[in-house]
Image: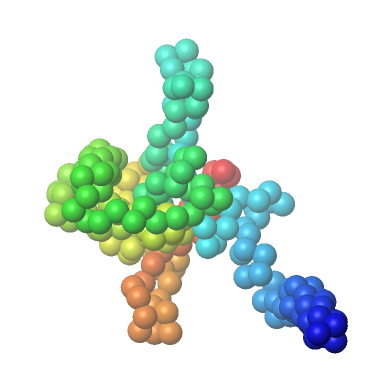
């Protein structure tokens, strides 16, 4: 029995070292050499400043100011609203605030859940309020589903091409660009289907907005 206990202890130590230390270090080393960008979260820098990640959605909002030009607050939090100069990401409902990368999760609410119905209605209302002034023909039926529903992670970095084409009217007007110029950027930053057949084409919002800033010389 003593021999069995000794063997078990040795096996536990050996496998702890192999699988808890050696294996993770080897995998980390290989990933840093083979694909460092993916291993480090595909971080995006502009002028040495970290502005986001290609694989994590984020907010493109601005602080709401009062009549005196001071930031408005509500319950100790700064009030923000969508910045009309930028393409807006897919809705997010992470705990602790939208696009909270530390709280990525799916709500698990079904399509017939009242909370889902209310959230969708609010997202539709906000989308129309933001886009319809620049595209008067826009109707509720034309709003893409990704402009209404959150993604499984609540951190989708892409929006559909249809969503981007609608937003292009607003962005072009606010940036003083032609619609064809903005549509050209949308096409440039639209990714193809995975492996050529999986999923739908998507537009990376961060990359598209950074390209807009470069084009109009308006740094974030």
The image quarter in which residue 21 lies: bottom right
Q: Where is residue 88 in the image (x, y as percent from the top left)?
A: 39, 49
How many discs appear? 0
Q: Residue at x 78, y 78 (%)?
A: 12
Compared to 109, does 218 lie above or below? above
Determine whether, in the image, residue 213 is placed left or right of residue 74.
Answer: right
Q: In this view, does 118 lie to the left or right of 211?
A: left
Q: Quick one: quadrant of the N terminus?
A: bottom right
Residue at the image point whose x is 25% and y is 40% from the top: 122
Which sits in the foreground, 25 or 174?
25
Which residue is depicted at the point 46% across and 22% down?
Answer: 75
Residue 172 is at least partly visible in this image: no
At x 32% / y 46%, what residue is drawn? 170
User: Farthest residue in the top direction?
Assistant: 68
Question: 144 and 98: which one is in front?
Answer: 98
- Check the image and report above or below for 46 versus 184: above
Q: Position of residue 216 (x, y in %)?
A: 50, 48
Foreground residue, 28 or 5? 5
Q: At which x and y percent is residue 4?
A: 80, 86
**Quadrant in which the C terminus appears:** top right
Q: Residue 57 appears at what percent x and percent y?
A: 48, 54
Q: In the picture provided, is 130 more to the left or to the right than 63?
A: left
Task: Place residue 174 in its image quadrant.
Answer: top left
């Amino acid at each position: 029995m003593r021999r069995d206990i000794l063997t078990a202890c040795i096996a536990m130590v050996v496998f702890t070292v192999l699988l808890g230390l050696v294996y993770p270090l080897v995998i980390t080393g290989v990933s840093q050499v083979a694909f460092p960008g993916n291993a480090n979260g595909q971080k995006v820098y502009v002028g040495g400043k970290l502005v986001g990640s290609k694989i994590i959605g984020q907010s493109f909002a601005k602080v709401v100011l009062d009549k005196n030009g001071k930031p408005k607050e509500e319950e100790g939090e700064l009030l923000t609203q969508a910045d009309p100069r930028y393409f807006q990401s897919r809705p997010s409902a992470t705990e602790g605030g939208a696009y909270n990368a530390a709280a990525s999760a799916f709500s698990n609410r079904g399509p017939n859940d009242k909370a889902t119905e209310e959230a969708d209605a609010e997202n539709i209302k906000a989308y129309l309020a933001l886009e319809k002034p620049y595209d008067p023909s826009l109707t509720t039926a034309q709003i893409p589903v990704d402009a209404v529903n959150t993604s499984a992670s609540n951190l989708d970095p892409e929006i559909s091409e249809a969503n981007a084409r609608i937003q292009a009217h607003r962005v072009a007007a606010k940036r003083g660009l032609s619609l064809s110029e903005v549509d050209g950027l949308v096409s440039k930053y639209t990714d193809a289907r995975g492996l050529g057949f999986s999923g739908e084409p998507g537009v990376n919002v961060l990359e598209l907005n950074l390209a807009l800033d470069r084009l109009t010389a308006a740094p974030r």
